[in-house]
C-alpha cells in the first residue's frame, strides 16, 4: 500500500511478497476487502503504539518551555519516521470518503489523534481544548510533507512552520516567523499542460482519480469521462505515467491560481463565511466529497513515491496559503481589533484546513460538512484573535 496505494493491494501481490499463494491469502482474509480491513487495523495498532511511546516520555511533566523542541521532533517523526503508517492512514481516509465499509476505523483513528494531542497539551500544562487544532496541523503537515526533505532548506521550512505554530500554542502573541524557502519556491514557474487539446481532457482525468483513485486512471476511463475518443487521449498522453503527470500538473495549476477576490466573497467576510467556503469546496451539504479534493490527496501521496512528481509537490506545498492570505486580509480588514495575518500564518491556516478534511471524511456523511465548518471556524478564530 505504501508503494502503490490501495489499488496495488491484491491477493497475488501480497502473496508474492509474503511467500504465500494467492489462494492462501484469500483463505486467511476472505478476499481483498478483508485483507484491506486487516491492514488498516494493523496500522491503527501501530499508530497507537507510536502515540504511547511519545506519551511515555512526558510522564514527569516537562516544563512548558520544552514544548517547542519536543513538538518539532514529534512532528518530524510523525511525518518522516512514520511515513509508512501515515501513508496507509491517508489511504484509510480516502477509503472512508468513498465507502462506509471502514468508516468506523477512520473515525477511531481521528478520535485517537485528538485524544493523544489532548494528553500532550495537558502534560505541558497547556490548553487541552486545542487538541483538535494540533491534530489537524499534524495531519496537514504529514499530508503535505510526504517524503523526507532532500535539502537543508526544505527541512528548515518544515521546522520553522512547526516552531511558529507551537509558539502560538504557548503564546498567542508570538511574532512572525521566517518563510524564505516558501517565497523562493513560489518564484519557480508552474507547469502548464501543453495545448488546449490536452487541457480539455484533464478535468475528466481528475474526476476519474477522485472517484476511483489512481487505480482507476486509464486512458479508456478518461476518454469515457471526457467524452473524447480513446485515440485523442493516447495521442496527448501516450503512457499512463504521462497521464498521471498531466493530472498532477492540472491540480497544481488549480491550487495555485489566484481567483478574483470578489468571486470568493459571498457577503460580509468573517470566519464563518470563510469556513463555509473552504468546507464547501471539499464536501457538499449531503456529505459527498469533492472529487477534486480526493484527487489532490491521492496525487500528493503519489508524489511522495514518484520522483517525477516531486517538483510539483514542492511547488504545491510552498503555494499553500496564498489564496488564504488574500481572503484573511480582506476578512480582518472588516474586523476591529483582529490580529493582522501574514504569509506564514496564512500557510498555517491553510495547513490546518487541509488537515481537518480527513477527519471530516471519517464522519457520517450527513454530519461531515457541518463538522468541518465548525472545525475550520474555530481554527481561524484562534489564529486571528
Image: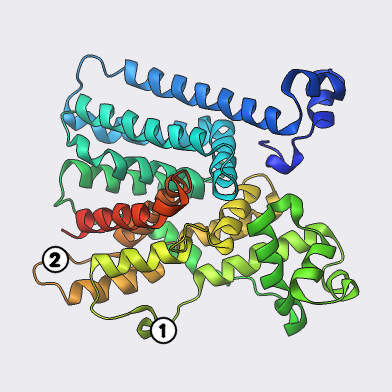
Residue 68: image quadrant is top left
Task: Write down the residue under mark 2.
Answer: 338
What is the spatial separation of the Cα atoms under label 2 and label 1, in whole angstroms? 24 Å
The image position of residue 88, as x and y in percent, is 59, 35
Q: Nearer the viewer, residue 345 or 269?
A: 269
Badge 2 element: loop
Residue 4: image quadrant is top right
When the figure is inspected, residue 259 is found, relative to residue 23, above or below; the finding is below
What's the coloring here? rainbow
Rate crowding at label 1 as few (under 14), some (14 to 19) or many (20 or more) other CA atoms within 10 Å: few
Residue drawn at x 64%, y 71% as measured from the top left: 191
The image position of residue 64, as x and y in percent, is 17, 30
Q: Nearer the viewer, residue 79 or 127?
A: 127
The image position of residue 188, as x and y in percent, is 55, 69
Looking at the image, the residue that sits furthest to the right is: 231
Residue 6: image quadrant is top right
Residue drawn at x 51%, y 21% as measured from the top left: 45
Q: Nearer the viewer, residue 319 or 27?
A: 27
Q: Nearer the viewer, residue 315 or 337?
A: 337
> Quarter holding the N terminus?
top right
**Marks 2 and 1, the one that precedes in the sequence:** 1
> Quarter holding the C terminus?
bottom left
The reply, left or right, for residue 48 in relation to residue 3 is left
Task: Write down the residue under mark 1.
Answer: 260
Rate crowding at label 2 as few (under 14), some (14 to 19) or many (20 or more) other CA atoms within 10 Å: some
Query: Is residue 208 visible to us here?
Result: yes
The image position of residue 234, as x and y in percent, is 87, 69
Query: Is residue 187 visible to us here?
Result: no
- All told, the count of numbered labels is 2
Badge 1 element: loop
Amino acid at each position: 500500500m505504501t508503494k502503490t496505494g490501495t489499488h496495488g493491494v491484491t491477493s497475488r501481490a501480497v502473496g508474492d511478497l509474503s511467500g504465500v499463494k494467492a489462494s492462501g491469502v484469500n483463505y486467511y482474509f476472505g478476499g481483498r476487502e478483508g485483507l484491506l480491513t486487516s491492514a488498516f487495523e494493523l496500522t491503527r495498532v501501530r499508530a497507537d503504539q507510536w502515540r504511547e511511546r511519545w506519551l511515555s516520555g512526558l510522564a514527569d511533566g516537562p516544563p512548558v518551555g520544552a514544548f517547542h523542541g519536543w513538538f518539532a521532533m514529534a512532528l518530524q517523526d510523525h511525518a518522516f519516521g512514520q511515513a509508512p503508517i501515515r501513508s496507509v492512514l491517508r489511504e484509510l481516509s480516502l477509503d472512508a470518503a468513498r465507502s462506509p465499509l471502514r468508516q468506523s476505523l477512520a473515525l477511531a483513528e481521528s478520535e485517537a489523534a485528538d485524544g493523544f494531542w489532548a494528553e500532550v497539551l495537558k502534560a505541558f500544562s497547556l490548553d487541552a481544548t486545542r487538541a483538535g487544532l494540533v491534530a489537524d496541523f499534524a495531519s496537514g503537515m504529514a499530508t503535505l510533507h510526504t517524503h523526507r526533505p532532500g535539502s537543508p532548506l526544505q527541512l528548515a521550512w518544515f521546522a520553522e512552520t512547526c516552531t511558529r505554530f507551537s509558539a502560538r500554542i504557548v503564546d498567542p502573541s508570538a511574532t512572525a516567523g521566517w518563510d524564505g524557502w516558501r517565497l523562493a519556491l513560489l518564484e519557480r514557474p508552474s507547469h502548464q499542460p501543453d495545448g488546449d487539446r490536452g487541457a480539455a481532457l484533464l478535468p475528466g482525468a481528475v474526476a476519474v482519480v477522485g472517484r476511483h483513485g489512481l487505480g482507476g486512471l486509464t486512458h479508456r476511463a478518461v476518454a469515457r469521462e471526457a467524452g473524447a475518443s480513446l485515440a485523442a487521449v493516447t495521442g496527448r498522453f501516450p503512457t499512463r505515467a504521462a497521464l498521471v503527470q498531466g493530472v498532477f500538473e492540472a491540480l497544481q495549476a488549480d491550487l495555485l491560481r489566484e481567483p478574483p477576490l470578489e468571486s470568493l466573497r459571498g457577503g460580509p467576510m468573517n470566519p464563518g463565511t470563510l469556513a463555509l467556503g473552504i468546507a464547501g469546496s471539499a464536501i457538499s451539504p449531503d456529505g459527498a466529497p469533492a472529487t477534486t479534493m480526493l484527487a489532490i490527496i491521492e496525487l500528493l501521496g503519489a508524489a511522495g513515491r514518484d520522483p517525477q512528481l516531486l517538483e510539483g509537490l514542492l511547488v504545491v506545498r510552498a503555494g499553500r496559503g496564498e489564496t488564504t492570505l488574500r481572503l484573511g486580509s480582506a476578512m480582518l480588514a472588516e474586523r476591529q481589533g483582529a490580529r493582522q495575518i501574514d504569509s506564514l500564518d496564512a500557510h498555517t491556516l491553510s495547513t490546518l484546513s487541509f488537515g481537518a478534511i480527513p477527519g471530516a471524511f471519517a464522519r457520517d456523511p450527513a454530519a461531515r460538512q457541518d463538522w468541518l465548518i465548525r472545525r475550520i471556524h474555530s481554527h481561524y478564530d484562534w489564529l486571528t484573535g
